[in-house]
Amino acid sequence: DAKTTQPNSMESNEEEPVHLPCNHSTISGTDYIHWYRQLPSQGPEYVIHGLTSNVNNRMASLAIAEDRKSSTLILHRATLRDAAVYYCILRDVPGNQFYFGTGTSLTVIP
Amino acid sequence: DTGVSQNPRHKITKRGQNVTFRCDPISEHNRLYWYRQTLGQGPEFLTYFQNEAQLEKSRLLSDRFSAERPKGSFSTLEIQRTEQGDSAMYLCASSLTGRAYGYTFGSGTRLTVV
């Protein structure tokens, strides 16, 4: 299974943009890149996913490197509610289940 | 649709007792997953169903654990003869089939074995 590498923790000031990096150097051509986040005492929440092109939704943007070996989740204006653990995950074949790592714990400073 | 529902939210049990958790997925989702999460760790895959068929089980799923999904609707996860090491958050998720689809998770069941 292709694995991902993320920093253990990051900090951001409130209302500033946040760029959360993820390395996935062994990604296969058909793996989708998914991002989830988990707030304390809650289940993980879907954020965004993509295959090759950059993606935008109401929560965030996903920038995927041209060689697909890394990606960056972009929160355009961090709020206190964005403080969570962010997981970068590859959905592989044939199992189709997600393998979570330890993610990046984002702290948002007021 | 109200999303994925898990019951109970919290369960405290004595070591050696059996416990059962229930998960109600999003109705049109044919896949259902169980994960376990301990403090400071990401969720760990336990098992998943496509409709009523259990397609994969992790090595984490010892013979004390059993999961069912009768009629491809709700699912139950039973732990027999609980041990203190079973204390964790048990998460259920559902999805449509395919790599392009994400999961919708429930809020989990927090199990404490005393």
Image (tube, grey):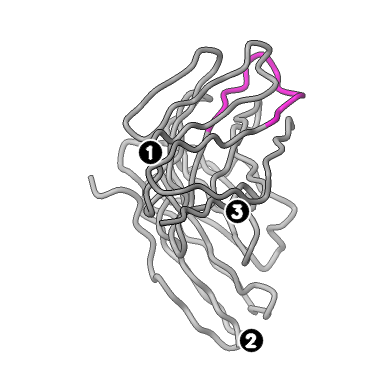
Alpha-carbon neighbours of circle 1 within 10 Å: few (<14), some, or many (≥20)?
A: some
What amino acid is labelled 3 in the image? Pro
Residue B72 at x, y percent in the picture: 41, 44
Label 1 vs label 3, nearer the camera: 1
Q: Chain of mark 2?
A: B
| The stretch drawn in magenta includes residue A27 | yes
Label 3 vs label 2, nearer the camera: 3
Instruction: Report the front residue among A49 and B52.
Output: A49
Q: Are marks 2 and 1 on the same chain?
A: no
The residue that disc 1 covers is A77
Alpha-carbon neighbours of circle 2 within 10 Å: few (<14), some, or many (≥20)?
A: some
Compared to residue A25, the image places residue A11 above or below, namely below
The residue that disc 3 covers is B43
Q: What label does residue B15 carry, if any?
A: 2
Identify the residue at the far left of this view.
B1
Q: Chain of mark 3?
A: B
Instruction: Report the front residue among B41 and B93.
Output: B41
Helix, strand or loop for disc 3: loop
**Magenta part of the protein: which range?**
A23-34
Residue at point 48%, 46% (across, down)? A37
Horizontal placement of A4 versus A87: left or right? right
Helix, strand or loop for disc 2: loop
What amino acid is labelled 2 in the image? Arg
Residue A22: image quadrant is top right
Dominant SS in magenta: loop
Alpha-carbon neighbours of circle 3 within 10 Å: few (<14), some, or many (≥20)?
A: many
Task: Please report contact status of discs 3 and 2: CB closer than 8 Å, yes or no.
Answer: no
Residue A29 at x, y percent in the picture: 67, 13
Residue at point 57%, 27% (across, down)? A33
Label 2 vs label 1, nearer the camera: 1
